[in-house]
Image (spheres, helix red, strand yellow):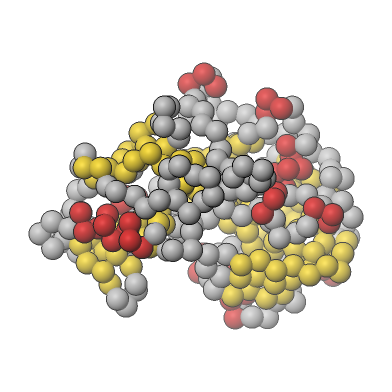
Amino acid sequence: MNGRDTSITQGMRIPLRNVDVAYLLKLDIGGHDFWVVFDTGSADLWVASTDCTTEDCHGVPKYSQAESHTLNLSGEPFSLNYLSGSVVGIVGTETIEFGWYQIASQTFALADQTSGLNLADMGNSGILGFAFPSIAAIQPALGTTVLENIFDHLGDERRFFGYTLGRNTGTSSDSSITIGELDSSIVNDSSQLSYFPVFRTTHSPYDFWKLPIQSLTINSLSLPLSHSLVPGAVSPIGVLDTGTTFILGPAVDVEIFWNTVNVGNSVRYNNDSQKWEVRCDRAIDVRVRLGGEDAALEIPLHPEDVSITWDSADEDAWCTGGLQANDGV
Protein backbone atom coordinates (compact mmCIF):
# COMPACT_ATOMS: atom_id res chain seq x y z
CA MET A 1 0.00 0.00 0.00
CA ASN A 2 1.77 3.09 -1.21
CA GLY A 3 0.23 6.53 -1.57
CA ARG A 4 2.47 7.12 -4.60
CA ASP A 5 0.36 4.77 -6.72
CA THR A 6 -1.60 7.61 -8.25
CA SER A 7 -3.32 8.82 -11.35
CA ILE A 8 -4.02 12.52 -11.40
CA THR A 9 -6.01 14.75 -13.68
CA GLN A 10 -5.44 18.49 -13.43
CA GLY A 11 -7.82 21.42 -13.13
CA MET A 12 -8.11 24.96 -11.82
CA ARG A 13 -10.12 26.65 -9.04
CA ILE A 14 -11.60 24.35 -6.41
CA PRO A 15 -14.37 25.94 -4.34
CA LEU A 16 -14.33 26.04 -0.54
CA ARG A 17 -17.29 26.38 1.81
CA ASN A 18 -17.03 29.10 4.46
CA VAL A 19 -18.65 27.98 7.73
CA ASP A 20 -17.42 31.04 9.71
CA VAL A 21 -14.95 29.14 11.90
CA ALA A 22 -13.32 27.12 9.09
CA TYR A 23 -13.21 26.53 5.35
CA LEU A 24 -14.38 23.16 4.05
CA LEU A 25 -13.43 21.24 0.92
CA LYS A 26 -15.62 18.54 -0.65
CA LEU A 27 -13.81 15.22 -1.08
CA ASP A 28 -15.01 12.09 -2.83
CA ILE A 29 -13.58 9.19 -0.82
CA GLY A 30 -14.30 5.77 -2.25
CA GLY A 31 -17.26 7.06 -4.26
CA HIS A 32 -18.93 9.06 -1.44
CA ASP A 33 -18.76 12.80 -0.75
CA PHE A 34 -17.49 14.24 2.52
CA TRP A 35 -16.79 17.79 3.64
CA VAL A 36 -13.37 18.15 5.31
CA VAL A 37 -11.55 21.14 6.81
CA PHE A 38 -8.89 22.60 4.51
CA ASP A 39 -5.99 22.86 6.96
CA THR A 40 -2.53 24.22 6.13
CA GLY A 41 -1.48 23.60 9.74
CA SER A 42 -1.45 19.79 9.53
CA ALA A 43 -0.49 17.20 6.92
CA ASP A 44 -2.76 14.15 7.26
CA LEU A 45 -6.08 13.24 5.66
CA TRP A 46 -8.63 11.51 7.84
CA VAL A 47 -12.38 10.98 7.83
CA ALA A 48 -14.78 9.73 10.48
CA SER A 49 -15.77 6.11 9.87
CA THR A 50 -18.96 4.27 10.76
CA ASP A 51 -16.96 2.72 13.62
CA CYS A 52 -16.75 6.14 15.28
CA THR A 53 -19.27 6.24 18.12
CA THR A 54 -17.85 9.07 20.27
CA GLU A 55 -20.21 11.98 20.81
CA ASP A 56 -18.03 14.26 18.68
CA CYS A 57 -18.74 12.03 15.64
CA HIS A 58 -22.50 12.22 15.88
CA GLY A 59 -24.49 14.02 13.21
CA VAL A 60 -22.00 13.94 10.31
CA PRO A 61 -21.69 11.64 7.28
CA LYS A 62 -19.30 8.75 7.96
CA TYR A 63 -17.13 6.60 5.72
CA SER A 64 -18.28 2.97 5.48
CA GLN A 65 -15.75 0.23 4.81
CA ALA A 66 -18.54 -2.05 3.63
CA GLU A 67 -19.58 0.35 0.85
CA SER A 68 -16.11 0.67 -0.71
CA HIS A 69 -14.52 -1.60 -3.31
CA THR A 70 -11.19 0.26 -3.38
CA LEU A 71 -10.27 0.36 0.33
CA ASN A 72 -7.14 -1.35 1.62
CA LEU A 73 -6.45 -1.38 5.34
CA SER A 74 -2.90 -1.45 6.68
CA GLY A 75 -3.78 -2.44 10.23
CA GLU A 76 -1.53 0.38 11.48
CA PRO A 77 -2.94 2.68 14.19
CA PHE A 78 -3.40 6.41 13.69
CA SER A 79 -3.34 9.10 16.36
CA LEU A 80 -3.13 12.87 16.02
CA ASN A 81 -3.48 15.77 18.47
CA TYR A 82 -4.37 19.28 17.32
CA LEU A 83 -4.15 22.54 19.26
CA SER A 84 -7.74 21.77 20.16
CA GLY A 85 -9.04 18.24 19.80
CA SER A 86 -7.72 14.83 18.82
CA VAL A 87 -8.43 11.85 16.57
CA VAL A 88 -7.65 8.12 16.73
CA GLY A 89 -8.18 5.48 14.06
CA ILE A 90 -6.57 3.13 11.58
CA VAL A 91 -4.56 3.75 8.40
CA GLY A 92 -5.68 2.64 4.93
CA THR A 93 -5.60 3.63 1.28
CA GLU A 94 -8.51 4.70 -0.90
CA THR A 95 -9.32 6.46 -4.17
CA ILE A 96 -10.07 10.13 -3.56
CA GLU A 97 -11.26 12.94 -5.81
CA PHE A 98 -11.63 16.67 -5.25
CA GLY A 99 -12.10 19.39 -7.81
CA TRP A 100 -10.49 17.99 -10.92
CA TYR A 101 -7.95 15.81 -9.11
CA GLN A 102 -8.17 12.05 -8.73
CA ILE A 103 -5.67 10.05 -6.69
CA ALA A 104 -5.76 6.27 -6.54
CA SER A 105 -4.46 4.50 -3.41
CA GLN A 106 -4.20 7.68 -1.35
CA THR A 107 -3.10 7.03 2.21
CA PHE A 108 -5.59 8.30 4.81
CA ALA A 109 -6.98 7.43 8.23
CA LEU A 110 -10.38 6.08 9.19
CA ALA A 111 -11.25 7.72 12.50
CA ASP A 112 -13.01 5.63 15.15
CA GLN A 113 -12.59 8.25 17.90
CA THR A 114 -12.64 12.05 17.76
CA SER A 115 -12.70 14.51 20.62
CA GLY A 116 -13.05 18.29 20.87
CA LEU A 117 -13.32 18.87 17.10
CA ASN A 118 -17.00 19.92 17.00
CA LEU A 119 -17.64 18.05 13.75
CA ALA A 120 -21.41 18.41 13.78
CA ASP A 121 -21.28 22.15 14.51
CA MET A 122 -19.08 22.78 11.47
CA GLY A 123 -20.55 20.05 9.25
CA ASN A 124 -17.24 18.39 8.42
CA SER A 125 -16.44 14.68 8.57
CA GLY A 126 -12.66 15.06 8.69
CA ILE A 127 -9.61 17.18 7.95
CA LEU A 128 -7.30 17.47 4.92
CA GLY A 129 -3.82 18.72 5.82
CA PHE A 130 -1.69 20.75 3.39
CA ALA A 131 1.44 21.27 5.52
CA PHE A 132 4.81 19.59 4.92
CA PRO A 133 4.92 15.77 5.08
CA SER A 134 7.49 15.76 7.90
CA ILE A 135 4.72 16.54 10.44
CA ALA A 136 2.33 13.84 9.18
CA ALA A 137 1.21 11.36 11.83
CA ILE A 138 1.04 8.66 9.14
CA GLN A 139 4.58 7.40 8.64
CA PRO A 140 6.18 7.68 5.15
CA ALA A 141 6.49 3.90 4.88
CA LEU A 142 2.68 3.71 4.74
CA GLY A 143 2.32 6.36 2.03
CA THR A 144 2.57 10.04 1.30
CA THR A 145 0.32 13.04 1.87
CA VAL A 146 -2.28 14.30 -0.60
CA LEU A 147 -0.28 17.43 -1.43
CA GLU A 148 2.96 15.49 -1.92
CA ASN A 149 1.20 13.04 -4.23
CA ILE A 150 -0.07 15.87 -6.40
CA PHE A 151 3.29 17.65 -6.41
CA ASP A 152 5.02 14.42 -7.48
CA HIS A 153 3.07 14.67 -10.75
CA LEU A 154 3.83 18.33 -11.41
CA GLY A 155 7.00 19.98 -12.67
CA ASP A 156 9.15 21.92 -10.22
CA GLU A 157 7.80 25.24 -11.46
CA ARG A 158 4.20 24.13 -10.72
CA ARG A 159 4.72 22.80 -7.21
CA PHE A 160 2.75 25.47 -5.45
CA PHE A 161 -0.77 26.06 -4.25
CA GLY A 162 -2.78 29.14 -3.43
CA TYR A 163 -5.98 29.88 -1.60
CA THR A 164 -8.38 32.74 -1.14
CA LEU A 165 -10.54 32.84 2.00
CA GLY A 166 -13.60 34.97 1.45
CA ARG A 167 -16.15 36.41 3.87
CA ASN A 168 -19.35 35.16 2.26
CA THR A 169 -20.65 32.11 4.10
CA GLY A 170 -21.49 28.95 2.19
CA THR A 171 -19.91 27.81 -1.06
CA SER A 172 -19.21 30.90 -3.13
CA SER A 173 -16.73 32.16 -5.69
CA ASP A 174 -14.74 34.16 -3.13
CA SER A 175 -13.29 31.08 -1.35
CA SER A 176 -11.22 28.56 -3.28
CA ILE A 177 -7.87 26.85 -3.74
CA THR A 178 -5.69 26.29 -6.79
CA ILE A 179 -2.83 23.83 -7.18
CA GLY A 180 -0.07 24.31 -9.72
CA GLU A 181 -1.83 27.24 -11.36
CA LEU A 182 -2.43 30.89 -10.58
CA ASP A 183 -5.96 32.00 -9.79
CA SER A 184 -6.63 34.47 -12.60
CA SER A 185 -9.28 36.24 -10.51
CA ILE A 186 -6.49 37.22 -8.08
CA VAL A 187 -3.31 37.47 -10.17
CA ASN A 188 -2.37 36.71 -13.77
CA ASP A 189 1.41 36.83 -13.66
CA SER A 190 3.83 35.34 -11.13
CA SER A 191 5.94 38.52 -11.38
CA GLN A 192 3.16 40.27 -9.41
CA LEU A 193 3.75 38.00 -6.41
CA SER A 194 6.00 38.61 -3.40
CA TYR A 195 8.23 35.67 -2.45
CA PHE A 196 9.55 34.80 1.01
CA PRO A 197 11.58 31.74 2.01
CA VAL A 198 9.76 29.45 4.43
CA PHE A 199 11.63 29.32 7.74
CA ARG A 200 13.08 26.06 8.95
CA THR A 201 15.49 25.14 11.71
CA THR A 202 19.00 24.30 10.45
CA HIS A 203 19.44 20.59 9.64
CA SER A 204 15.73 19.96 10.15
CA PRO A 205 13.05 19.29 7.50
CA TYR A 206 10.40 21.84 6.63
CA ASP A 207 7.34 21.36 8.83
CA PHE A 208 4.87 24.26 8.88
CA TRP A 209 4.39 27.24 6.55
CA LYS A 210 6.48 29.55 8.76
CA LEU A 211 7.39 33.17 8.06
CA PRO A 212 9.36 35.63 10.21
CA ILE A 213 7.30 38.43 11.78
CA GLN A 214 9.26 41.68 11.65
CA SER A 215 6.74 43.94 13.34
CA LEU A 216 3.17 44.35 14.55
CA THR A 217 1.65 47.83 14.74
CA ILE A 218 -1.59 49.25 16.12
CA ASN A 219 -2.53 52.66 14.73
CA SER A 220 1.14 53.13 13.72
CA LEU A 221 2.40 52.19 17.21
CA SER A 222 4.88 49.30 17.09
CA LEU A 223 4.33 46.64 19.76
CA PRO A 224 7.10 44.67 21.45
CA LEU A 225 6.99 40.96 20.61
CA SER A 226 8.35 38.04 22.60
CA HIS A 227 11.52 36.34 21.44
CA SER A 228 10.80 33.27 19.35
CA LEU A 229 11.07 29.85 20.96
CA VAL A 230 11.79 28.32 17.53
CA PRO A 231 15.46 27.21 17.47
CA GLY A 232 17.58 29.42 15.23
CA ALA A 233 14.92 32.09 14.73
CA VAL A 234 16.10 35.70 15.04
CA SER A 235 12.60 37.15 14.70
CA PRO A 236 9.25 35.86 15.98
CA ILE A 237 7.80 33.21 13.69
CA GLY A 238 4.23 33.05 12.37
CA VAL A 239 2.53 29.97 10.94
CA LEU A 240 0.05 30.29 8.07
CA ASP A 241 -2.68 27.96 9.31
CA THR A 242 -6.09 27.92 7.60
CA GLY A 243 -7.42 25.41 10.13
CA THR A 244 -7.29 27.88 13.02
CA THR A 245 -10.19 30.29 13.45
CA PHE A 246 -8.32 33.00 15.36
CA ILE A 247 -4.92 34.64 15.08
CA LEU A 248 -3.10 33.00 17.99
CA GLY A 249 -0.09 34.21 19.93
CA PRO A 250 1.67 34.00 23.30
CA ALA A 251 -0.53 35.14 26.18
CA VAL A 252 1.85 37.93 27.21
CA ASP A 253 1.92 39.41 23.69
CA VAL A 254 -1.84 39.13 23.26
CA GLU A 255 -2.44 40.89 26.57
CA ILE A 256 -0.13 43.74 25.55
CA PHE A 257 -1.98 43.97 22.22
CA TRP A 258 -5.43 44.34 23.79
CA ASN A 259 -4.25 46.63 26.57
CA THR A 260 -2.86 48.90 23.86
CA VAL A 261 -6.18 48.80 22.01
CA ASN A 262 -8.13 49.47 25.22
CA VAL A 263 -9.18 53.11 25.02
CA GLY A 264 -12.27 54.17 26.98
CA ASN A 265 -12.87 50.66 28.36
CA SER A 266 -13.40 49.32 24.86
CA VAL A 267 -11.71 45.98 25.62
CA ARG A 268 -12.39 43.29 28.21
CA TYR A 269 -11.39 39.71 28.99
CA ASN A 270 -14.38 37.37 29.23
CA ASN A 271 -13.61 34.85 31.96
CA ASP A 272 -16.53 32.63 30.94
CA SER A 273 -15.43 32.17 27.34
CA GLN A 274 -11.75 32.82 28.15
CA LYS A 275 -11.60 35.15 25.15
CA TRP A 276 -10.65 38.79 24.66
CA GLU A 277 -13.56 40.96 23.53
CA VAL A 278 -13.68 44.43 21.99
CA ARG A 279 -16.48 46.91 21.37
CA CYS A 280 -17.89 46.27 17.91
CA ASP A 281 -17.57 49.94 16.98
CA ARG A 282 -13.88 50.17 17.97
CA ALA A 283 -11.87 50.96 14.82
CA ILE A 284 -8.36 49.48 14.94
CA ASP A 285 -5.67 49.77 12.27
CA VAL A 286 -3.47 46.67 12.66
CA ARG A 287 -0.56 45.89 10.35
CA VAL A 288 1.94 43.05 10.35
CA ARG A 289 5.25 42.89 8.46
CA LEU A 290 6.07 39.37 7.26
CA GLY A 291 9.18 37.98 5.58
CA GLY A 292 12.90 38.60 5.74
CA GLU A 293 14.19 41.71 7.46
CA ASP A 294 15.40 43.24 4.18
CA ALA A 295 12.33 42.36 2.12
CA ALA A 296 9.36 42.24 4.47
CA LEU A 297 5.87 42.99 3.24
CA GLU A 298 3.48 45.03 5.40
CA ILE A 299 0.00 43.51 5.42
CA PRO A 300 -2.97 45.39 6.89
CA LEU A 301 -5.46 43.20 8.74
CA HIS A 302 -9.08 43.54 7.72
CA PRO A 303 -11.15 45.08 10.56
CA GLU A 304 -13.40 42.00 10.55
CA ASP A 305 -10.35 39.87 11.34
CA VAL A 306 -9.57 42.01 14.39
CA SER A 307 -13.14 42.30 15.70
CA ILE A 308 -15.36 39.31 14.92
CA THR A 309 -19.15 39.57 14.97
CA TRP A 310 -20.76 36.12 15.00
CA ASP A 311 -24.33 37.43 14.83
CA SER A 312 -25.90 40.79 14.10
CA ALA A 313 -24.88 43.12 16.92
CA ASP A 314 -25.35 46.74 17.94
CA GLU A 315 -22.33 48.98 17.50
CA ASP A 316 -21.87 49.25 21.27
CA ALA A 317 -22.07 45.45 21.72
CA TRP A 318 -19.08 43.25 22.46
CA CYS A 319 -17.38 41.39 19.61
CA THR A 320 -14.85 38.57 19.92
CA GLY A 321 -11.28 39.67 19.39
CA GLY A 322 -9.63 38.17 16.35
CA LEU A 323 -6.34 37.81 18.26
CA GLN A 324 -6.42 35.30 21.11
CA ALA A 325 -3.90 33.73 23.49
CA ASN A 326 -2.50 30.24 23.12
CA ASP A 327 0.92 29.43 24.54
CA GLY A 328 0.92 26.11 22.70
CA VAL A 329 1.58 27.66 19.29
Q: Residue at x 57, y 53 (%)?
A: 41
Q: Is residue 171 left or right of residue 251?
A: right
- Report the number of discs: 0
Please tell me which residue lies in front, 230 or 299. 230
x and y percentages locating residue 96 in the rendered image: 76, 51
Instruction: Point out residue 38 in the picture as x, y percentages from the top left corner.
Output: 58, 52
Q: Is residue 240 visible?
A: no
Q: Is residue 138 visible?
A: yes
Q: Residue at x 72, y 74 (%)?
A: 112
Q: Is residue 138 above or below residue 160?
A: below
Q: Residue at x 78, y 36 (%)?
A: 152
**103 relative position to 14: left or right:** right
User: Residue lying furthest left in this view?
Assistant: 264
Q: Left or right: where does residue 18 sit relative to residue 14?
A: left
Quadrant of the image occupied by residue 11: top right
In the image, what residue occupies the spot 53% across and 64% down?
83
Residue 144: x and y, percent?
Answer: 78, 49
Q: Where is residue 15? Give x, y as percent.
A: 57, 44
Q: Quadrant of the N terminus?
A: bottom right
The answer to whether 58 is drawn above or below residue 96 in the figure is below
